[in-house]
Amino acid sequence: MPENNFPKLHNATWPGIVGKGSDSEPVIPFETLLEKTATAEVDGVKFDGVDIDLFDAHFSINSSDDDIKRLADQVAGYNLNIGSIVAPIWPPEGGSAMGSKEERAQFVEQVRKAARIGQKLTELGVRPSGVVRIDSASSPEAWLQDPGNNTLLIAQTFREAADAAAEYGERLAAEGEICWGGMHSWKAMLETLEAVDRPNVGFQADMAHTFLYLLGYNSPEDRLLPADVDLSNRDAMDEGFRKLTNALRPWTIDFHVAQNDGTVFGSGSHDKTGRHCLATDPNGKLDIAYHAGFWLRDENGELTKKMRHICWDGCMFPNEVMYKQETWNNILAAMIKVRQAHGWYEA
């Protein structure tokens, strides 16, 4: 049997920006991340592509058609494709999804711009799969001031953004992360998605972030594992993962492979969220290839094949680590194991 060649294996470029900047370490250039990604190789297998951000430090969301063509050529020059893209929906360019009318309009406009870029990249032949990633651009603390109405506001903003994205044939993936209001627990995330009720809106599962859904960070009442759980107890972990993934897997349209040690972390301007660990971190609580299966297979253990590509996400690592080629080779090795365990072959 041939080796699995789906889902395609992507690296993320936004870890070169997230948690970096004037109040932290310098931003890592986009070109450098492309070079590291393209150079990584394990037993003849290489990354297939990158998922990208639309942040000014890498590529502006206000770019022209000529700029988009140059981006496509730049990435293709490394024999890589582009997958999912991150829309910068936060203030001041964007706005809170549960904010004022003006703020919510800014949010929708940023999504519209991102969807246009996504469509152009697809038309240029360098983006065979992918979504536009969003969040609520709001804190759990602000959301808790009026949970019911704030969820309705977020849902309304997401609906308007979904309609804007649909004009360009794009889907939106709401990132499950504990630092975003209305998305900070598995139950809040599910309620938000159900309230949105748009066919082109789904869930982005990141293994490091969704792991903290089990532990109830920022929402103890929604925890799926006991407070005194032994995280080395595979049976207990599996029970929690089944509950989590059975609830959110039907909504999942984008998937990030990652590792977490059961703690939160923030750097630069980024709020504390599920700590991304290196694939080889001895303190990691996840068996990456095994636990990825909870998301990539259904409750009967059958492959869903919903994700045409999967992406490694590892934000807020020190630059010293990210400049080492060994880091990316180890990450690629972990990604390959996920595809070997939960992938498929297409001629």
Image: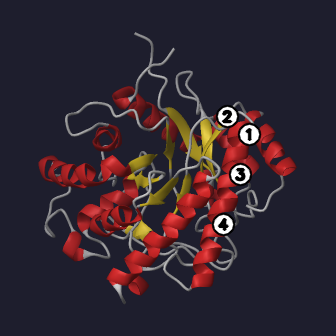
* Amino acid type, label 2: Leu
**What is the x, y in percent for residue 321?**
58, 53
Q: Closer to the observer: label 4 or label 1?
A: 4
Disc 1 crowd, CA 10 A, few/some/many (<14, 14-19, 20+):
many
- 3D distance between C-alphas at marks 2 and 1: 6 Å
Which residue was labeled with disc 3? 117
Q: Earlier in the sequence, mark 2 or mark 1?
A: 1
Residue 324 in view, yes or no? no
- Asked whether the residues under the numbered discs 2 and 1 touch, taking CB atoms below 8 Å apart as contact, a structural biologist would say yes
Which residue was labeled with disc 1? 75
* Amino acid type, label 1: Val
Image check: 233 left or right of 304?
Answer: left
* Amino acid type, label 4: Gln
- 3D distance between C-alphas at marks 3 and 2: 17 Å
- 3D distance between C-alphas at marks 4 and 3: 11 Å
Disc 3 crowd, CA 10 A, few/some/many (<14, 14-19, 20+):
many
Q: Earlier in the sequence, mark 1 or mark 3?
A: 1
The numbered mark at residue 34 is none
Which residue was labeled with disc 4? 110
Image vertical order of residue 39 relative to residue 314, above or below: above
Image check: 151 left or right of 235?
Answer: right
- Asked whether the residues under the numbered discs 2 and 4 touch, taking CB atoms below 8 Å apart as contact, a structural biologist would say no
- 3D distance between C-alphas at marks 4 and 1: 23 Å
Which residue was labeled with disc 2? 80
